[in-house]
Image (cartoon, rainbow, N blue to C red):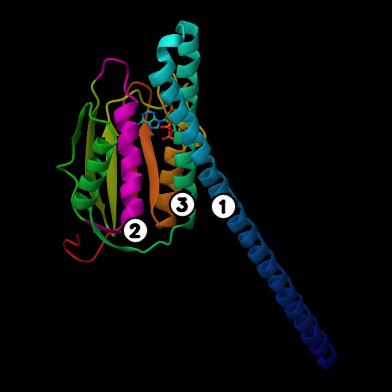
């Protein structure tokens, strides 16, 4: 009996040692992966950042040619010039969005109590300043305080609002409603639109980078907006989702723990 106990004890010691060894190896591997990921993010950021100045030059010089030599170009020449300007504009938008996506991964998250009404007003102001003035955004039903990182929450709401205003059928005026819903310890924010809607088969993939359901001739975009929303919400410890079907508009939601103070602005 004693012999058996001694052998069992030895076995346990050996397996404990093996578990410790495996844990250490796993931790080292996780650290390596984290470092590789950080390097990749830095690489994306640097490339995107450095691409911007040649792109600006391309766009700027195309405009100069149009202004100063436009009269000596025939229609075909003008057409080529327009295509260069449009390509430079599209690529600049893409690079700007990639930088925002990369920033959403790197930015330090500072969670604090944020007044929902205030954050939504900020987001609406930014969307209007960005030139999206068609349609209406109703925000009366959005109240409460939640825990979030202010700039990231605003960015997330801006992206949802821009999409809500953009994806309407031709000739339809966008009508967007933002409202909040208390759900026990959390607060859910809804962004609801009267747009084209999204088939449930696509509800998951639209949150991946570069996933678009339309050609850019129909609706402008880069396919990064919702990837930023997902990354931002998850980094702030929130959850998100949507309810939508083709022709029935879309209702996107984001949810965070409720704040404790009454109105932290
Ligand atoms: P972008 O708006 O630049 O195309 P996003 O990542 O923001 O990229 O969205 C991905 C895709 O999801 C869009 O191209 C569109 O097909 C679909 N989508 C997003 N928001 C809406 C919406 N409110 N209504 C209908 N479709 C939407």
Query: Horizontal and vertical percent for residue 18?
Result: 76, 75
Quarter the N terminus occupies: bottom right
Q: Is 92 placed above or below 235 here?
A: above
Q: How many marks?
A: 3
Number of residues whose C-alpha sits closer than 10 Å to that of mark 1, classed few (under 14), some (14–19) or many (20 or more): some
**Residue holding disc 1:** 41
Looking at marks 3 and 1 on the same chain, the residue that comes earlier in the sequence is marked by: 1
How far apart, in angstroms, are the residues tagged by discs 2 and 1? 21 Å
Q: Is 182 placed above or below 30 here?
A: above
The residue under the point 27% across, 38% down is 127
Look at the image and give the residue range highlighted in magenta: 145-172
Q: Nearer the viewer, residue 96 or 240?
A: 96
Circle nearer the viewer, 2 or 1: 1
**Residue holding disc 2:** 149
SS class, disc 3: helix
Residue 4 visible from this viewpoint = yes
In this image, 99 relative to 188: left or right? right
* Residue reaching furthest to the right: 3
């Amino acid at each position: 009996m004693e012999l058996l106990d001694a052998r069992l004890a030895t076995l346990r010691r050996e397996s404990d040692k093996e578990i410790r060894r495996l844990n250490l190896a796993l931790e080292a591997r996780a650290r390596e992966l984290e470092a590789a990921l950080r390097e990749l993010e830095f690489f994306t950021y640097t490339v995107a950042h450095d691409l911007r100045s040649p792109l600006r030059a391309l766009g700027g010089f195309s405009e100069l040619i149009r202004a100063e030599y436009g009269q000596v170009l025939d229609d075909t020449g003008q057409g080529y010039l327009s295509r260069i300007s449009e390509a430079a504009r599209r690529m600049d938008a893409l690079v700007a969005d990639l930088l925002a996506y990369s920033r959403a991964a790197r930015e330090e998250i500072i969670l604090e109590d944020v007044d929902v009404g205030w954050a939504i007003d900020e987001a609406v102001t930014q969307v209007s300043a960005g030139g999206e003035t068609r349609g209406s955004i109703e925000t009366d039903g959005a109240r409460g305080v939640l825990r979030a990182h202010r700039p990231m929450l605003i960015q997330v709401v801006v992206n949802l609002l821009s999409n809500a205003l953009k994806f309407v059928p031709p000739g339809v005026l966008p009508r967007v409603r933002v409202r909040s819903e208390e759900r026990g310890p959390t607060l859910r924010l809804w962004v609801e639109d009267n747009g084209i809607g999204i088939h449930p088969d696509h509800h998951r993939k639209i949150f991946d980078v570069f996933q678009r359901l339309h050609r850019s001739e129909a609706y402008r975009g880069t396919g990064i907006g919702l990837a930023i929303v997902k990354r931002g919400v998850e980094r702030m410890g929130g959850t998100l989702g949507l309810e939508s079907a083709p022709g029935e508009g879309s209702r996107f939601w984001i949810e965070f723990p409720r704040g404790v103070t009454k109105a932290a602005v």
